[in-house]
Image (cartoon, helix red, strand yellow):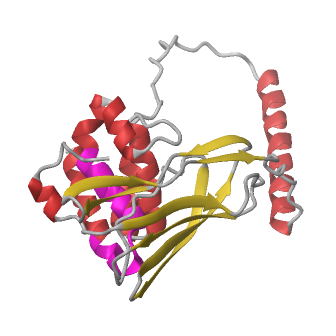
Amino acid sequence: MVLASYGMGFAQALPRIHVIDFTMRSDTAAPRVGQPFHIEIAGRLKEPLGSVDFVILPNLAGLEPLGDERRAIATSHGTDFSETLTVVARSGGNLHLSAAYFDAVDPRDGRPKRYYSNDLALNVTGSPPPMLPSTSPWSLLLKLVAALLVVFLAGAVLLRGKAKPTQTAAVANPEPIDETPAPEDGFRRALGALKRERTRSAVMALRSELWKTAGAHGGETLNALLSRNGAAIPMQNSLRLVERAAFVQESRLDAAIEDAVRAVEVQVQ
């Protein structure tokens, strides 16, 4: 697909590569709730490259990322690359992952193009395990304290019932306080956590809140979100830089986080 909306400045920043193959697969079509599984995004390029860090991964809504591993093997015949994501589903049901993609200049005609992998359709089976009652000593102690507190409160109520009633002045009912958190609270908390921790898990938490703030649907790509929801367009710089920080290779993570934090801070001002 030709990226006609991008100018020559954008095209000059893209790699010039011949794309031979680009796919996405899961090691199981029916993962179970709570059991980690792997999603692999792989491809072949005609040119030998030392690293492949320009692939945009799909929106993992409905999955919890546990880690990723990148590999790029360059030979005289080109480059074989892959990225393996370890993820876990927390609820059952049908799950659709949209295609991964990347932008590159096609050397055959010198035009910038977007290359997509295939989509994935998964059927998550099972249900979350039930919470088992704790039998640790601390748990038993807390239960004992709670039982004693109930007995104490019951005794206080009985004693108060026997006391002589006294006249009290009427007090106007206070206005109820709306303690419903604002929609952006989770987003701001995630940004604050990333500024303190500077870890990939903190990036993923901010990514999730940012996608929710932008009105993303499950399984939707960033390009599809911006095309569907015009209100998300002012956030596209933040969305792209956080996306890059979420999946950039480890050696570039600190710099990518710094760029993402700056962009998001400008967004919330």
Residue 142, image quadrant: bottom right
Q: Residue at x 41, y 63 (%)?
A: 246
Return the residue found at the far bottom: 76
Question: Where is the C terminus found, in terms of image quarters?
Answer: top left
Q: Residue at x 51, y 70 (%)?
A: 83
Q: Residue at x 55, y 59 (%)?
A: 24
Rendering coords of residue 195 (x, y %): 33, 64
Front residue of 186/123: it is: 123
Number of marks in the rendered image: 0
Front residue of 31/253: it is: 31
Q: Residue at x 46, y 18 (%)?
A: 174
Residue 258, image quadrant: bottom left
Front residue of 142/26: it is: 26
Rendering coords of residue 27 (x, y %): 70, 63
Looking at the picture, does residue 143 appear above or below residue 233?
Answer: below
Looking at the picture, does residue 25 appear above or below residue 146?
Answer: below
Residue 249, image quadrant: bottom left
Q: Is residue 225 magenta?
A: no
Q: Name the chief secondary structure element in magenta.
A: helix
Q: In this rendering, would 2 be left or right of 73?
A: left
Q: Is residue 252 magenta?
A: yes
Q: In this rendering, would 129 be left or right of 234?
A: right
Q: Can you see residue 248?
A: yes
Span shown in magenta: 236-255
Looking at the picture, does residue 165 appear above or below residue 118?
Answer: above
Q: In this rendering, would 12 be left or right of 41?
A: left
Return the residue found at the far front: 108
Q: Can you see residue 186?
A: no
Rendering coords of residue 172 (x, y %): 47, 12
Rendering coords of residue 221 (x, y %): 43, 44
